[in-house]
Image: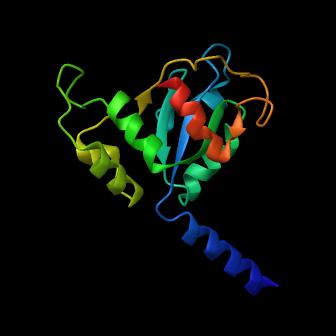
Amino acid sequence: MTEEKQEKKTEKKINSAGALTAVIRISGMVKVREVIENPLSRIKLRRKYACVLIDPNNKSMAGIIKKVKHYIAYGEIDKATLVKLIKARGKSVEGDKKELKIDAEKVASELMDGKKLEEFGLKGFFRLAPPRKGINSKLQYPKGVLGNNKKDINKLIERML
């Protein structure tokens, strides 16, 4: 039985290789306990509707997500949505006035391979707008948006661009 469990774990890692998890902060900053605010701040989700991309195989990030799952929406982002996100909301580290001169397709493919946004001169987070047509921000997925949205996170991100 233990060999089967190990095989399943390695299959998950292999299947999620080349995948990124998009994490969006849904709840605001008022009356959030310090125990929750610190992990959110550590992964650069300091404001409402901020989005970060993380590696799903990182165990420490998985622990943070598990701890704050009632304040965030997360799921596996696909490449097409990632390209749109970089084009629409990618900001330079040097400041907003600097015009981005990067190939979003190339950046997206290299992010999927394991590189970080900072290596391309981009900020490590994206500021998104509130979603068009609204969301139910107090209920867990599938009735609301909190928690693991799986592939539906792509629809949510597109509504927020």
Q: Is residue 26 above or below residue 31?
A: below
Give the left or right position of residue 119, taking residue 77 as reference.
left
In the orientation shown, which residue stands out farthest toward the top? 30
Q: Nearer the viewer, residue 49 or 151?
A: 151
Q: Residue at x 50, y 65 (%)?
A: 17
Q: Is residue 127 visible?
A: yes
Q: Is residue 24 above or below residue 120?
A: above
Q: Residue at x 31, y 48 (%)?
A: 105
Q: Residue at x 17, y 25 (%)?
A: 98
Give the left or right position of residue 74, taking residue 4 as reference.
left
Q: Residue at x 72, y 33 (%)?
A: 70
Q: Position of residue 158 (x, y in %)?
A: 52, 31
Model colouring:
rainbow
Q: Position of residue 78 (x, y in %)?
A: 50, 49
Q: Nearer the viewer, residue 156 or 62?
A: 156
Q: Position of residue 152 (x, y in %)?
A: 64, 41
Quadrant where the N terminus lies?
A: bottom right
Q: Is residue 155 above or below residue 150?
A: above
Q: Nearer the viewer, residue 64 or 155?
A: 155
Q: Is residue 124 visible?
A: no
Q: Nearer the viewer, residue 65 or 130?
A: 130
Q: Number of labelled discs?
A: 0
Q: Quadrant of residue 30?
A: top right
Q: Position of residue 115 (x, y in %)?
A: 34, 55
